[in-house]
């Protein structure tokens, strides 16, 4: 346990030295592997023109049991012609409800608490994580979340978010997918590529790359998301 705590502390310090990660953070999967540690960094370019906004997200995670994991995020943003600023910090708790393959679908829960650093804004969220083997090499996943935002500088309100992914497991290093994001800010969909490479002794490097097209007039026509995670 002491060794795990040292790894977790090292990961936390590393996350704090990086710019914070992207708010559009991909589709979550309901699985937890006990003792797994992870350091993650992501970027999202919301719009690819002169008025683009770059979101950064860095995190450190640890799986305390075979059911429960926590992840701590720092989030920042900067416009195409401005300085970076820390926007928020966030704590996530993931709870795996069913064993993988125990039922026709796999289920989990996600809880989030976000505290704004740039303005007086806080957010709490809870959601359901779902994943299902469709036969062959196809896998579907979806997240449905209910969020509540409050603060002196915003209107207190409930919001919803939905994310979905259809993935083809071609090989571990290359899994093409199609993703959908629907929330209070963006309605977007597009292709993505996921992959993982074992690094020996239980270590693994995972990456994601997605290109998204806006589905309404409020969403940028084109956005790009990247993510890199080291599991150990």
Image (tube, grey):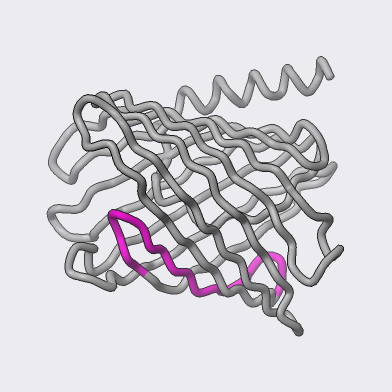
Q: What residue appears at the point 73 percent right and 74 percent down from the top-left corner?
A: 133
Who is closer to the viewer here, 205 or 141? Answer: 141
Displayed quadrant of residue 161 = bottom left
Residue 222 coordinates in the image, percent (x, y): 27, 67
Q: In the rendered image of this protein, does residue 77 appear above or below residue 17? A: below
Q: In the rendered image of this protein, does residue 143 appear above or below residue 97? A: below
Q: As drawn, is 101 to the left or to the right of 57?
A: right
In the picture, the quarter occupied by the C terminus is top right
Q: As drawn, is 178 to the left or to the right of 156?
A: right
The mark total stands at 0
Q: In the rendered image of this protein, does residue 138 appear above or below residue 114? A: below
In the picture, the quarter occupied by the N terminus is top right
- Residue 173 lies in the magenta stretch: yes
Who is closer to the viewer here, 42 or 166? Answer: 166
Q: As drawn, is 35 to the left or to the right of 146?
A: right
Residue 201 coordinates in the image, percent (x, y): 85, 42
Q: What residue appears at the point 52 percent right and 67 percent down from the top-left corner?
A: 164
Q: What residue appears at the point 80 percent right and 54 percent down from the top-left corner?
A: 98
Who is closer to the viewer here, 71 or 223? Answer: 71
Q: In the rendered image of this protein, does residue 5 appear above or below residue 147? A: above
Q: As drawn, is 160 to the left or to the right of 12?
A: left
Who is closer to the viewer here, 183 or 70? Answer: 183
Residue 68 coordinates in the image, percent (x, y): 73, 37
Q: What residue appears at the point 48 percent right and 62 percent down from the top-left corner?
A: 163
Residue 193 coordinates in the image, percent (x, y): 53, 68
Which residues are the magenta region?
171-188
- Residue 37 lies in the magenta stretch: no
Seen from this angle, which residue lies furthest front? 157
Displayed quadrant of residue 158 = top left
């Amino acid at each position: 346990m002491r060794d795990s705590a040292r790894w977790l502390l090292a990961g936390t310090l590393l996350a704090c030295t990086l710019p914070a990660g992207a708010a559009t953070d991909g589709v979550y999967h309901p699985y937890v592997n006990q003792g797994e540690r992870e350091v993650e960094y992501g970027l999202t370019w919301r719009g690819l023109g002169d008025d683009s906004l770059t979101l950064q997200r860095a995190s450190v995670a640890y799986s305390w049991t075979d059911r429960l994991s926590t992840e701590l995020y720092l989030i920042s943003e900067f416009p195409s012609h401005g300085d970076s600023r820390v926007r928020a910090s966030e704590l996530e708790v993931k709870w795996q409800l069913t064993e993988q393959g125990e039922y026709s679908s796999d289920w989990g829960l996600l809880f989030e608490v976000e505290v704004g650093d740039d303005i007086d804004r806080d957010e709490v969220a809870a959601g359901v994580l779902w994943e299902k083997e469709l036969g062959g090499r196809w896998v579907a996943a979806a997240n449905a979340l209910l969020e509540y935002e409050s603060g002196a500088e915003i209107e207190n309100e409930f919001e919803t978010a939905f994310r979905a992914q259809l993935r083809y497991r071609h090989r571990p290093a290359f899994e093409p997918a199609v993703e959908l994001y629907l929330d209070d800010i963006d309605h977007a969909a597009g292709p993505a590529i996921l992959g993982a490479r074992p690094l020996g002794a239980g270590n693994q490097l995972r990456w994601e790359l997605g290109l998204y097209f806006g589905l309404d007039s409020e969403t940028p026509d084109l956005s790009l998301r990247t993510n890199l995670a080291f599991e150990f």
